[in-house]
Image (tube, helix red, strand yellow):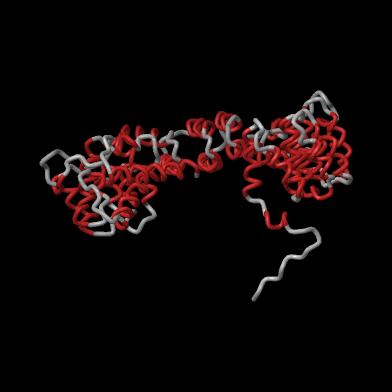
Amino acid sequence: MVGVRLDTEEGRSVAATLLTREYPLLVADRFASNGPAAWTAFDEEVRRLHSRAYAPLRRDRIEARLCDPDGRVRASALAAWRNPPAQLVLIRCADWAPPVRERARRVLGRLVAKDPSRMLAELTPLVLRLGSREHGAWALEQLEAALSGRYSVLAARWRPGQPSTTWSRNSLTAPQRDEILGRLRRSGDLPTRRFAVRLTLESGRFGLREQALLAAGESDPLTARMWADALLAAMAATGPDDGTIDALLRARVPTARSAGVTALRGAGRAAEAGEHLTDRSELVRACARWLVRQDGGDPYARYRELLADPDRVTAYAVAGFAECAGREDGPLVRALLRHPVGAVRAAAVAGLRRLDTSHFELLLRPLLDDPCPAVAREVARGLHPLAHRLPPEWLAERMAPDRPTHTRRAAFRLLREQGGLPALRAAVSLLDVRDAPLRELAKSTLRAWDWAETLRPEGTARAPERP
């Protein structure tokens, strides 16, 4: 969302500059590293500025004329320039005015047909963004047809001087489609990647192991899930494939790894599920516990065995144990609060919070001074609902400049939850601290502070609101 907001601001800024003074750059060059939001924001801002201008704005640039609020100006711009910016022509393909819309679609077909592989890859993010508009489905339908091997105006071969009625109806070749889809699957725009994966799966060009490798390298959970679901369905129909399962088990995204764990049962490899009980993902651990039970094992007993050995216990083993343990298991987790590894101590704190053990506050208070930042962070989360019970002066002591930054941050979060003058004093004392996140947290606290409530004399009631 941050990237979309920045692209939108960039589009508006360029529009304002283009309409009010000399602008030496091409808009396409300026937006080369921006997403589709920059183009749509530019288009909207040009019309907005024209509607609110007290004096005539510049209309000498093709980019401005293509976005002009006057439909006749937009139509003439499409007819006059030989190579207008393809992104703005694409936006005009969804124009509300039928003459502009029809002319833009003919122009876009000519532009794309000159270099289909490059142009379709560049325009796809914007096509997907415009697809939800009233007249935006046309470009999306043409794009899907072109990349699926069907005839599309966007894939038709065209030569200068050749009328549209004589375009050659040759669709993209298979190598061209593979090249474009490969570029789209590597796109930084998530909707584009998901769109490309859907078309790739529909084409059926990749074998199971190739798909598994693509799923394993995917960083987007939804996209990885698309690959994984397709692989599970294929293996259910054709039988398990060990290479495919192994690739899924090495995937970066939990959704793909969990699919690999699920597939172990069909491959007769359920005994391997125990190796994934300590996966870093809660989803994968849950799938592993299910498979262990299906194989007649007891995941709870395996976790207890790991936690009883200080040399074998890991943070994820503690997390997995807490996910299937009960309140009576609190003492076993509590013993790990003294473990030499900070990650294990932090997991033990999170586990105790999950188990809702007794004397939780008394157990955690000393750990706010833990030298491991992860432990202090988990302690602050655990004590957050109980912050009103903590002595403000005890928290204020941990705000001293000689304390570690992570301790000061954890104590300040608890003071913020308490509110009152101690929290106000703490926020003011942090305005010049060197740690930027802590400093910004203090500033945001002061910006949102209820000063009227603070300045009201103690013991006075708030005046009733008048009807």
Q: Quadrant of residue 315?
A: top right
Q: Nearer the viewer, residue 176 or 26?
A: 26
Q: Residue at x 23, y 59 (%)?
A: 98
Task: Tally the numbered discs.
Answer: 0
Q: Residue 159's x, y, as percent?
A: 15, 38
Q: Residue furthest bottom?
A: 467
In the image, residue 325 above or below residue 367: below
Q: Is 197 on the left-hand or right-hand side of 83?
A: right
Of residue 70 and residue 171, the one placed in the foreground of this image is 70
State whether residue 298 appears in this view.
no
Residue farthest along the top direction in this orientation: 311
x then y, percent, for residue 416: 72, 46
Q: Nearer the viewer, residue 251 or 259?
A: 251
On-image quarter of the C terminus:
bottom right
- At x 78%, y 63%, the residue is 460
Q: Which residue is drawn at the image coordinates 26% and 47% (left, top)? A: 64
Residue drawn at point x = 73 percent, y = 37 percent: 377
- Residue 445 visible in the current orientation: yes
Residue 402 left/right relative to 101? right
> For residue 37, which quarter of the picture?
top left
Of the pair 350 and 272, the residue shown nearer to us: 350
Residue 211: image location, x then y, percent? 49, 34
Q: Where is residue 126 drawn, in percent x and y? A: 36, 45
Does residue 139 sit above or below 284 in this rendering? below
Residue, far left: 161
Left-right relation of 137 to 115:
right
Q: Is residue 433 above or below residue 311?
A: below
